[in-house]
Image (cartoon, rainbow, N blue to C red):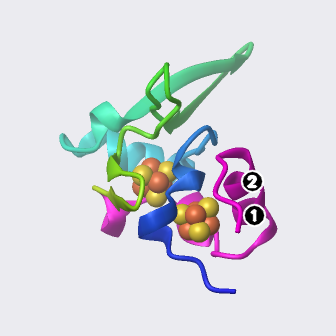
Amino acid sequence: MTYDCQSCGACCFGLDVLLSDAEAARFERTPALAPLAALEHCAPGLMLRFMRKDPETERCLALEGKLGAWRCTIYGERPTLCRDLAPGAPDCLTARRVQGREG
Ligand code: SF4
Ligand code: SF4
């Protein structure tokens, strides 16, 4: 089975997309990317950066469009976690199931 990411977009909802230290630094110094990263206090002394999500829909704020026609607005600069999530991989299938994109 093949998966069309632009139609699906499921993994851009709900997931906590952690930025590596290098990515966090790159986002911080890039004006267009900085607002898309949220700093979270995860444990005493531990601050991590994640992609910022819409609080109601949990949609990554870098995602534009609608079901059937999604677009990552920072595709060329998206975090490693997004690059590594291969269509058809277990995390993809979980995201599709959670977001009702089965079949
Ligand atoms: S859940 Fe899978 S098919 Fe859907 S956008 Fe992500 S990688 Fe692509
Ligand atoms: S950065 Fe792009 S690919 Fe990654 S979750 Fe956000 S919209 Fe999806």
Q: Mark 1, residues whose alpha carbon is within 10 Å: few (<14), some, or many (≥20)? A: some
Seen from the viewer's position, the closer of residues 39 and 92 is 92
Q: Is residue 23 left or right of residue 33?
A: right
Q: Is residue 4 magenta?
A: no
Residue range in magenta is 74-103
Picture disc at residue 97: 2
Q: Is residue 87 left or right of residue 44?
A: left
Seen from the viewer's position, the closer of residues 64 and 45 is 64
Name the kind of residue labelled 2 in the image.
Answer: Arg
> The C terminus is located in which quarter?
bottom right
Q: Is residue 94 magenta?
A: yes
Instruction: Name the residue that disc number 1 marks.
Output: 93
* Coordinates of residue 36 in the picture (x, y in percent): 35, 36
> The N terminus is located in which quarter?
bottom right
The residue that appears at 69% across and 53% down in the rendered structure is: 95
Whether the residue under disc 1 has CB within 8 Å of ligand 1? yes
Q: Mark 2, residues whose alpha carbon is within 10 Å: few (<14), some, or many (≥20)? A: few
Q: Quarter-wise, where is residue 34 in the image? A: top left
For numbered disc 1, what is the local secondary structure?
helix
